[in-house]
Image (cartoon, rainbow, N blue to C red):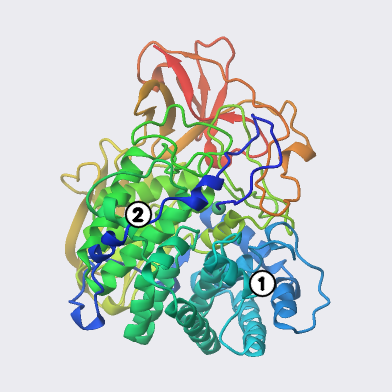
Amino acid sequence: MLRDSPSPSDNTMAQPFDRRTFLHGSLLTAGALSYWPRVVFGQVQGQRLLARPFELSQVRLRPGAALDAMNVNRRHLLAYDPDRLLHMFRLTAGLPSSAEPLGGWEAPNNELRGHFTGHYLTACALSFAQADDKALQERGDAIVAELAKCQAKFGNGYLSAFPEELFDRLRANQPAWAPFYTLHKIMAGMLDMHVLAGNAQARDVLQGMSTWTAQWVRSIDDALMNRILEREYGGMNEVLYNFAELTKEDRWRELAQRFNRSRIFEPLAAGRDELQGLHVNTTIPQVIGAARGYELTGNTNLHDCSDYFWHTVTERRSYCTGGTSNGESWNAPPGKLAAELSGYTQECCVTYNMQKLTRHVFGWTTDARAADFYERAYYNGILGVQHPRDGSKLYYVPLQSGFWKLFGTSMHDFWCCTGSMAEAFSKLGDSIYFKDDDGLYVNLFVPSEVTWQEKGLRLVQDTTFPESDRVTLTVRASAPRRAQLRIRVPYWTIGGSASLNGKQLEGFATPSSYFVLDRTWRDGDRVELRLPMRLHAAPMPDDPTVQAVMYGPIVLAGKLGTAGLTAETLRAEPTKPRTVPEYKSEPVAAPVIRASSSDPASWLKASGPLEFRTVGQQNELTLVPLNRIFDERYAVYWKVAV
Ligand SMILES: [Zn+2]
């Protein structure tokens, strides 16, 4: 989340970058405006998706790490007091509230207040869809009803935990953190409560908020709007495009287009990476909006922009974990990552939003490489950023050696990532399966089952992956049905194989493609897969002597001990307005690795399931999955001397 004030600390080790400059970026020249045609609803042509993800309500997780993590998150969500989440909304609307105010970025004097309540509604809606969690559905329903009362009190469709005056300041180019960012979270929460949890009132509230937004934007000319769009605004374009699709009303589509940021989109659509210097998580949600806009309008500029963006970020700006950003920005040209390691790498919101964008890209292309990336982010950017004990979340995943995961403190942080990760852990079954009219894609190897209603088929996936390289897919069919089963063969496997009902199948697909079984499926048909994993290096593109080690899709982290880590240093202090967490201890150095070859198997030996020991080094170290390291210092990237 972009801050608009410098950190209060001058501690260089712990100091996040000063990001004030992002707020005052250069303005768009008027000439660029004509670049983006205003596409009207009548011009929309046909379906642009080759595949669609299964609805969350059709996918259920089965016992395993993902289900465990989802349940930790659900318990955490239920621990929030709705009256506290509503407190500042009520006071701002002039309604009484005696609840204890929340802290951190939800504190009464914080200009982002209310954003987490929006995330919370989305998380409630997702939890209902993903796990049939009726308690969280009811929780969401109750909050929507109370927010509707606040909106009615405002009387003009406005709904926020801060007064409209922040938007006046935004228009006047005066300090205001990110009013539309916060509004977007609440609007997205309402949309999700309606679409995923069947709440009719949430649609009415969203209609009111959209109407207020249209009214606010109406008096603003394009030049002024471009200046306003320099301030972080979340995915206002995305939520309005989605609302346009829901209502089939042109006016929301046109309003969404007012939130397309041409200054950023134009070079991307032309295939130019001018991302250096940009705030990462300001940019990605805007590009997701572009992707959604393409799907709904057919504007190929929006396609080219988001498609190129996805490629340049995933191929040239991402760490082996699937994360990107350092100090929340892109500080270097594409392909320059070796010097971009700190305690503030890989903001969690960024990984989450890149996954969202990846879903679109996969739908347009069914390219296995998009699913490969999604898997990379799933295991190394999402699963390990929630503390398994209490459900608290990370802001950053530090990739400079010797740091540790600095978790927040419940009710006292409410960072952007606290909200995004509350959503992420509510939908861990998302994007495991996609479909088109003829076939079903198995993209992730996660214990789960999916119901394909149109075909009368159910597919059950049993696996202990990644502990094991074996996956069993069992078909449940009310009657024999023909369909294609398309199984992703990941980039990291070598020598995979498959059998059908116990009989070995000839041939297999090459890495980063699909193994396709086209047949008439009968109840009880079983496909057994073997996807062998191996150790492999993930070198930095600009310095191959700096490298991480992966086992299959899993990034390994070396355990560097707990020296200097206490209850105080392991948790971020209650966050003050507009600050990000600070490390209260120095990172420790990681040893240089002496290797006899570039193959990490030359300096690592398996010592247990997903556990490796260094060999031939001065001090032996143990490496385990990054997503299982908690409350301990670690190293992901090593200096390797061959
Ligand atoms: Zn964040």
Q: What residue is pinned by disc 1?
A: 162
Label 1: how many Cα within 10 Å (few below 14, some 14–19, many 20+): many
Q: Residue at x 40, y 79 (%)?
A: 243
Label 2: how many Cα within 10 Å (few below 14, some 14–19, many 20+): some
Lateral position of residue 590 relative to residue 307, left or right: right
Is residue 68 visible in the rendered image? The answer is no
Q: Amino acid at mark 2?
A: Ile
Q: Residue at x 44, y 37 (%)?
A: 331
Against 73, is 464 above or below? Answer: above
Q: Nearer the viewer, residue 240 or 601?
A: 240
Is residue 514 visible in the rendered image? The answer is yes
Q: What residue is pinned by disc 2?
A: 264
Against 38, is 10 above or below? Answer: above
Against 376, is 603 above or below? Answer: above
Q: Amino acid at mark 1?
A: Phe
Lateral position of residue 528 relative to residue 588, left or right: left
Indicate the quadrant containing the C terminus: top left, top right, bottom left or bottom right. top left
Q: Nearer the viewer, residue 78 or 504?
A: 78
Q: Residue 112 location in percent, x, y?
A: 63, 63
Lateral position of residue 155 relative to residue 431, left or right: right
Q: Earlier in the sequence, mark 2 or mark 1?
A: 1
Q: Residue at x 64, y 27 (%)?
A: 587
